[in-house]
Structures are given as structure tokens and as C-alpha cells.
Image: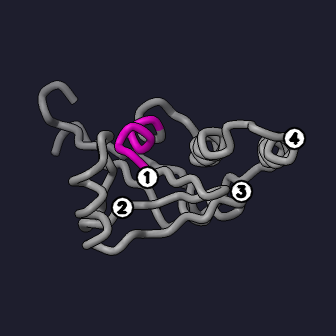
Amino acid sequence: MTFGDIKIFISINLNELIIIFRRLGIEADWLSRSETTKISLTSKNSVFTFKNRAIECKLNDKIIHVGGGLIFRILFSHLLPSSIAKFMMNGLLQLENTENLEKLVSASKEDYSSPSFVQEINLKVDPYS
């Protein structure tokens, strides 16, 4: 990898990530390009965009936009997408009342790993090519 002989491509199915958010009870969806532009210009934090569109998550009238840090954690810190969704849920709920606490506890007991999301990657390297 140091000399550029091996290239590794990593991908995330962002639509599947949205489905995981929805299974936890978070309203998540893609924003339009114009909405994404407005948020990118006004937001203090960096917003992750793909094809000029951002992902917005809502719960209890609170809104969070998926940032590059969350995607980075999935790719390089080996966090499961379901763990990221639970982290987002915790940030949205802020545990203000027992009903929210019950939602978070029940969500943390569920397993939202999806076979279509996590796939085995086989790397075959021919040292003589």
C-alpha cells in the first residue's frame, strides 16, 4: 500500500443507513439539492453531502444532519451503522423524560445489522502483475 501497488475501495450503502435510522424511529431522508445548499451555507458544522444532497434526521422536533465525522467513524473506526444510528438517537432525544429513555433502551437491545449492508470483501493480490 505504501508504494501504490494495492488499492482498497470502501463503500457505504447510504440508503441502507437511512433504513436503519428509520427502524430506530428516527425520521431520516435525503434533502433536496436546494435545501442542502441552504444548510451548508448556514450550518456551523460540516454536513456530509453525496451528489449535492445531505441526510436529515428528525426526532421529537429536533433535527440533526449527518456529518462527515459519522461517515468517517463507520469507515475507519469500525463502528456499526446501527451504533451510529443509536448515537444519533441519543443526541436527538437528550434523555429528557422516561418515555425517551425507554425508546433508547429498547433500541439498544435490537440488532439492526443487515446482510445487505455488511458484506464480505475478498481481496486477491497477484504479486506478479
CB contact under 8 Å: marks 2 and 1: yes
**Labels 3 and 1: the sequence-earlier one:** 3
Where residue 54 is drawn, which disc sits there?
2
Circle 2: residue type: Ala
From the image, which quarter does the C terminus lie in?
A: top left
Q: In the shown orientation, is residue 21 left or right of residue 50?
A: right
- In the image, residue 121 lies at what x, y percent? 47, 50
- Cα–Cα span, label 3 and label 1: 16 Å
Residue closest to the far top: 2
Mark 1 = which residue?
A: 65
Badge 3 crowding class, 10 Å Cα cut-off, few under 14, some 14 to 19, many 20 or more, is some
- Viewer-side residue, 61 vs 53: 61
Question: What SS does tag 2 mark?
Answer: strand
Neighbourhood count class around disc 1 (C-alpha, 10 Å): few under 14, some 14–19, many 20 upward: many
* Total residue callouts: 4
Q: Relative to 55, is 7 on the left or the right? A: left
Disc 4 marks which residue?
Answer: 98
Element at label 3: loop
| Disc 4: CA contacts within 10 A as few (<14), some (14-19) or many (>=20) | few
Residue hosting label 3: 24
Say which residue appears at 38% left-offset and 45% top-offset: 67
Residue drawn at the location 61% of the way across and 65% of the way down: 27
User: Which dot, 3 or 4, sits closer to the camera?
Assistant: 4
Hey, which quadrant is residue 22 in on the image?
A: bottom right
Q: Is residue 119 left or right of residue 24?
A: left
Q: What element carries label 1?
A: strand
What amino acid is found at the position of numbered circle 3 in the picture?
Leu
Q: Which amino acid does label 1 sit on?
A: His
Q: Where is residue 86 in the image (x, y as percent from the top left)?
A: 66, 43
Picture quadrant where residue 20 is located = bottom right
Q: Give the range drawn in magenta.
A: 66-73
- Answer above or below: position of 72 versus 49: above
